[in-house]
Image (cartoon, rainbow, N blue to C red):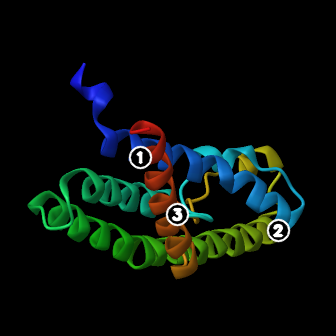
Amino acid sequence: MELFHNFPLWSALLAIVFAQVVKVPIEFIATRKANWGLVFSTGGMPSSHSAAVTSLTTGIGLVEGLSSPLFAISTIFAVIVMFDATGVRRHAGEQATVLNQLVEDFNRVVEEAKMWPTQEEREKQEKLKELLGHQPIEVFFGAITGIIVAFLVHFIWYS
């Protein structure tokens, strides 16, 4: 039952859910297309990774205090996660884009050279996931989202 009273944990989980769900209307405003798959995908605005770790860190800070070792650990963890989201994961996504383009180009050449008889086979080929990481602005707004969610949940939790 103690698990249900863990404010930082629930704050972080709610931040993840909120950040994932809010991606759909943000994408709709930008593209005028409803993409419900964003709720279960990586990447996009805001970063749910950043929202989660900043909400967790804010929650720990509110409960344990800013001078606690738990807050220090959580802060370093949050910085590493956000750095990774804008660095390694983002670059992996950019590499996936290039690789997907190479595969498309290669397939086009093969199709033109051999007049590939079945288009269905070509459509079954799996593309690499390109939306892996985040732009720095997505991480920033994910962090802001996490902090706001933590304060709102804290207000509701302890009111």
Judged left or right of residue 159, residue 76 is: left
Whole-number angstrom distance, CA of label 1 to CA of label 3: 21 Å
Looking at the picture, tell me which residue is in the foreground, 105 or 62. Answer: 62
Instruction: State the image coordinates of residue 128 (x, y, percent, origin top left).
Output: 55, 60
SS category of the residue bearing label 3: loop
Front-most of residues 150 and 102: 150
Q: Give the CA distance from mark 2 to mark 3.
A: 16 Å
Give the residue type that dot 1 points to: His
Q: Secondary structure at mark 2?
A: helix
> Residue 63 at x, y = what percent?
25, 50
Residue 106 in the image, given as x and y percentages of width and height:
67, 73
Q: Earlier in the sequence, mark 2 or mark 3?
A: 2
Q: How busy is the neighbourhood of tag 3: few (under 14 within 10 Å), some, or many (20 plus)?
A: many
Give left or right: position of 74 versus 94. Answer: left
Nearer to us: label 1 or label 3: 1
Say which mark, if any, is on residue 47: 3
| Residue at the image point whose x is 57% and y is 53% from the top | 19
User: Badge 2, how many Cα within 10 Å: few under 14, some, many 20+?
Assistant: few
Res. 154 mark = 1
Residue 40, located in which quarter of the rendered image? top right
Give the residue type that dot 2 points to.
Ala
Q: Which image quarter is the N terminus in?
A: top left
Depth order, front residue of 110/45: 45
Q: Spot the residue most to the top.
A: 1
The residue at the point 64 percent across, 46 percent down is 21
Which residue occupies the extreme left position in the image?
69
Could you tell me the amino acid type at mark 3?
Ser
Residue bearing the label numbered 2 = 30
The picture places residue 3, in percent across and down from the top left corner, at 26, 27
Compared to 136, does 40 lie above or below? above
Q: Is residue 121 left or right of residue 75?
A: right
Residue 118 seen anywhere in this rendered image of the structure = no
